[in-house]
Amino acid sequence: MILTVTPNPSLDRTYEIPALERGAVLRAGADRVDPGGKGVNVSRAVAAAGHRTTAVLPLGGPEGALLSRLLTGQGIEVAAVPVAGRTRVNISAVEPDGTLTKLNAAGPELTAAESEALLTAAGRHAAAGAAWTVCCGSLPRGLGDDWYAELVARTHRAGARIALDTSGPALIRALAERPDVIKPNADELADAVGRALVTVRDAAEAAEELRAAGAQAVLASLGPAGQLLVDRTGMYFGSAPVAAVRSDVGAGDASLAGFVTAGGTGPGALAAALAHGAAAVQLPGSAMPTPADLRPEAVTVTPDVPLDQPLHLPPSPRSRPHPRTADGAVR
């Protein structure tokens, strides 16, 4: 069973529009509402792949009730922690070329009691037989930068492995508790080591630094360049080109789901991560891929890491080239 923890979940409403025009009245060609939050998306991807998953998350107000119903309808077991605030609603606008504009709400401010209740629920469910706990996303107001570190420590005491997808001080503080895998994107990796990353070699050196600081494995999304895995079995590089991107909302979360359901270590898990991410960017909104959507034959994974390859990170979402390699590390 894969357990996910999402401290700041959301309802995600996605609109497909011809073009984003500031100050104009826009008519959407299609729209959809999906459960949101990075950990929630991992649970959705795990469930879509046919595996059992439980989502631990704080829920409040009618938005929280709807989020719980949507998750249950997708075959996800919901472990709700009631909170006084209302679950946030995020808005995404997707243009035909794949350009995504997001408006993310702040979400409720959790009290100290609500914070402890969330940690307690996560530890209890991890001890009940979780193979992995996957905790993702930003921390809501009221939770300190050491919250994820405490979650990692309690998860390990419960006997489960833990994957962490967050950034900034919360990531740095969690490293001391030795998370089993962290999943930064290129910007987060650069931020964590305090310098710019220009080549794959730079990213590999940064990943090794984070391993020395405590991370047992680093699964790094490098934008158009591909993905890099550095773990106890070695260093691997992979890519999965796609012809067109429909929406990359949640694609990084689908990638992490593929990684942990494939065992969470070595080149096979990296290949599964790439296949899931590439499939997700070709689906509408934050829809998660099913096994029928996967194209493992399009994935390339090698221990011969192209260290001198430039990362070529796009300067802005609007200037992203197409076709491009699936990454989907959007927050």
Image: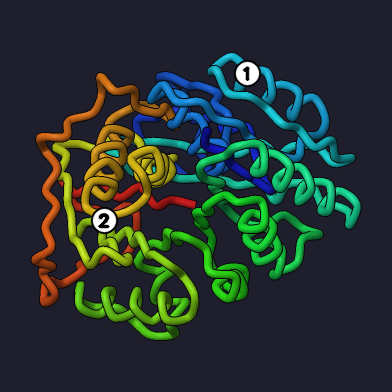
Kindly identify the residue that appears in the image at 28 percent across and 58 percent down. 223
Q: Which mark is residue 267?
A: none
Of 20 and 116, the residue lying toward us = 116
Snapshot quadrant of residue 124 = top right
Query: Colour scheme in the image?
Result: rainbow
Of 57 and 24, the residue lying toward us = 57
Task: State the SS at label 1.
Answer: helix
Q: Calculate the distance from the C-alpha at mark 2 to the C-alpha at mark 1.
A: 38 Å
Q: Amino acid at mark 1?
A: Thr
The x, y position of residue 58, in whole percent, is 75, 40
Of 242 and 320, the residue lying toward us = 242
Kindly identify the residue that appears in the image at 43 percent across and 67 percent down. 216
Q: Which mark is residue 72?
A: 1
* Lateral position of residue 97 relative to residue 92, left or right: left
Work out which residue is located at the far bottom of the displayed protein and give it: 195
The x, y position of residue 302, in whole percent, is 11, 57
Which one is closest to the eye, mark 2 or mark 1? Answer: 1
Closer to the chain start, of discs 2 and 1, is 1
The x, y position of residue 188, in whole percent, is 44, 68
**Residue 20 in sight in this render:** no
Query: Please, is residue 156 above or below residue 194 in the view?
Result: above
Q: Amino acid at mark 2?
A: Ser
Label 1 crowd bin: few (<14), some (14–19), many (20+), radius 10 Å: some
* Lateral position of residue 180 relative to residue 258, left or right: right
Kindly identify the residue that appears in the image at 76 percent across and 42 percent down. 121
Of 132 and 78, the residue lying toward us = 132
Kindly identify the residue that appears in the image at 33 percent across and 40 percent down. 262
* Lateral position of residue 194 relative to residue 59, left or right: left
The x, y position of residue 293, in whole percent, is 25, 24
Residue tagged 2:
319
